[in-house]
Amino acid sequence: MPPPPGKYVRYLIIAAVATTLFLLSRSSLPLPTTTPVSPSNEHSAGSSGQSEKKQSSSEVMRFAATHHGSRANATFVTLARNTDVWEIAQAIRQVEDRFNGNFHYDWVFLNDKPFDDNFKRITGSLVSGTARYGEIPPEHWSYPDWIDQDRARKVREEMKEQKIIYGHSESYRHMCRYESGFFFRHPLLQDYEYYWRVEPGVELFCDITYDPFVFMKENDKKYSFVISMYEYERTIPTLWDGVKQFMNDHPEHIVEGNSMRFLSDDKGKTYNNCHFWSNFEIGSLDWLRSKAYMDYFEALDRRGGFYYERWGDAPVHSIAAGLLLKKEQLHFWDEIAYYHTPFTHCPPDEQLRKDLRCSCDPSGNFDWNSHSCLSRYFKTNEVPLPPGVEEYSWLAIFGFVILFANIACIFAVAINSRARAEVLITVRHLYLQSQTFWERYQEEKREWERERLRMTR
C-alpha cells in the first residue's frame, strides 16, 4: 500500500519548525532574579587564590570606601545645540543631584555653532563645577576632501526610502564622525585625562555616591559602558571589512587578551554587530589620543563609511575598545541606573537599589533582553550568567528534541528510494499549485486595476 501523500514531507516541515523554535529561543532570556557578577570581581577573586564566589558589582562602592577624598582629572562632555537647552538642563540636573553636586567636576559643552547667551546662562547656573563652552572647528564638522558628496547624497536618499533611522540625515553623519575621531582633540579637553559623555534628555535613577573617574584611574580602566546592544546591520555593511584591513595593516595595535569574543562569533571573520551604547560612556582621553586609536580611526575614515553608509560612533568606539584594549580594561557599570530613549539599565539587586536610593523599575531592565549584548560581555570575561538567565530556555530544549527526532526522519527519507520519490512528487505538486495561485492572483490584480481605472474616468 503506497504511503499517504505528504507522509514524508511533513517530517521536513516539522524539522523546519523545530529549527525555528530553537533559533528563536536562544534569545528568549528571562530577567535574572539576583545580582549579576561583576567581571572584574570574578577575576580578582580567582587571582587572590580564594574559592570563586559570586560578588555583587557593588564592589565598586567597596573600593570607593577606601578612597575618600581622591579625585581624578576629569570632565563631563556634551555635544548639544542651542535648541537642546531644556533637554540638557534636565540631564545636568539629574547628574548634579545624583553625583556631581558632591564632586564638582567641570563640564565641557561643544557645538558646531556658537552657543547663545540663553544656553550659557541656563546650563551655567546648573553645573556645580566650571562650565566651559567650545565651538567645533569647521574642518571637524564637514566632508573631508576624499568624499564624493554626490554619492553621499544618493546614499542618504536611498536610506530615506528604506526608512533607516537617521539614514537621511547629513548632520547625523557629521556628528558620528566627530564623536568617533575628533571630540577628544578639542582644545578645551586637552587638559583632562578622563571624560563622561552626557546627552540631552538622559536620566539617572540611582545615587552615585562613589567617584567613577577615580575607580577608572586606580584600576587602569580605559573604557566603560552601561548598555550594550546590536547595531542595525544595514548601516554598517562594510565596517568590519575596514576593521579587518586595519588589523592586517597594524597588527602591532591588536593587543593580546582583547575582547574579540564579544565582537565576533567566528574569531574575527565576521562582526556580530555587538557594541556598547555610546550615549553613555566614561573613558580615557589619553587612550583616544593614542597612536593606536588614531591609526584605527584614520584607517576607517579614509574608507568613507561615515558618509557612504551610516557608520555610528558606538560600533567604532566599541570595536576599538574590543581590539586595542585588554578585556580587563573595560568596565560595565551595574550600579549606574540609566535611561536614554528607549532603553533602561536598572540594577537587579534590590539591596543595591535601596542603598543607592534608586527609582527605576527592575522589570524594565534591558540587560537580558534579546537585543542586549551583555551576556556576550559576561562570557568574554568568563563570568557565569546570573541565576535566572540561561543561554537556552525550555523552548530551546523542546526545539532540540523535535529537531533531533526529525533529523532521524530525514535520514530515513534520504536512504529510502520510495520515500524520496514520494517527497519529490509532493514537492512538485506543491510548486505547481503555488504557480497556479500566483497566476490567479496576478490576473485578479490586473482586473482590479482595470476596474479602478474605469471608475476614475
Image (cartoon, rainbow, N blue to C red):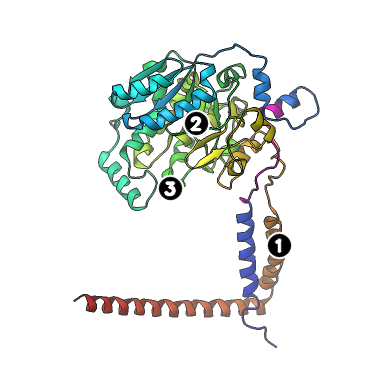
Are the residues flagged by discs 2 and 1 in contact, CB closer than 8 Å? Answer: no
Quadrant of the rendered structure where residue 328 is?
A: top right
Q: Secondary structure at mark 3?
A: helix
Q: Residue at x 60, y 37 (%)?
A: 261
* Front residue of 74 and 93: 93
Q: Nearer the viewer, mark 2 or mark 3?
A: 2
Q: Position of residue 250 (x, y in %)?
A: 49, 28
Report the span colored magenta. Answer: 27-43
Please indicate whether residue 431 sits to the left or right of residue 374 in the image. left
**Earlier sequence position, callout 2 versus callout 3:** 3
Quarter of the image where one finds residue 117: top left
Q: Most prominent secondary structure in the magenta stretch?
A: loop
Which of the numbered marks, if any, corresponds to residue 234? 3
- Find the distance from the CA under tag 1 to the CA under tag 3: 34 Å
**The disc label shown at residue 404, or none:** 1
The residue at the point 31 percent across, 80 percent down is 447
> Within the magenta stretch, is there residue 284?
no
What distance separates the C-alpha of mark 2 from that of mark 1?
A: 44 Å
Q: How would you rate the neighbour count of disc 3 (Cα within 10 Å): few for under 14, some for 14-19, many for 20 or more?
A: some
Question: Dot 2 surroundings within 10 Å: few (below 14), some, or many (20 or more)?
Answer: many
Residue carrying label 2: 280
Residue occupying the point 61% across, 55% down: 23
x then y, percent, for residue 364: 58, 43
The amino acid type, in three-letter code, at marker 3 is Arg
Element carrying mark 2: loop
Report the quarter where the N terminus lies.
bottom right
Give the farthest residue toward the top: 69
For the residue pair 259 and 442, the one nearer the viewer reads as 442
| Residue 391 visible in the snapshot | yes
Looking at the picture, how far across and down is residue 277, in whole percent?
50, 36
Q: Element at badge 1?
A: helix
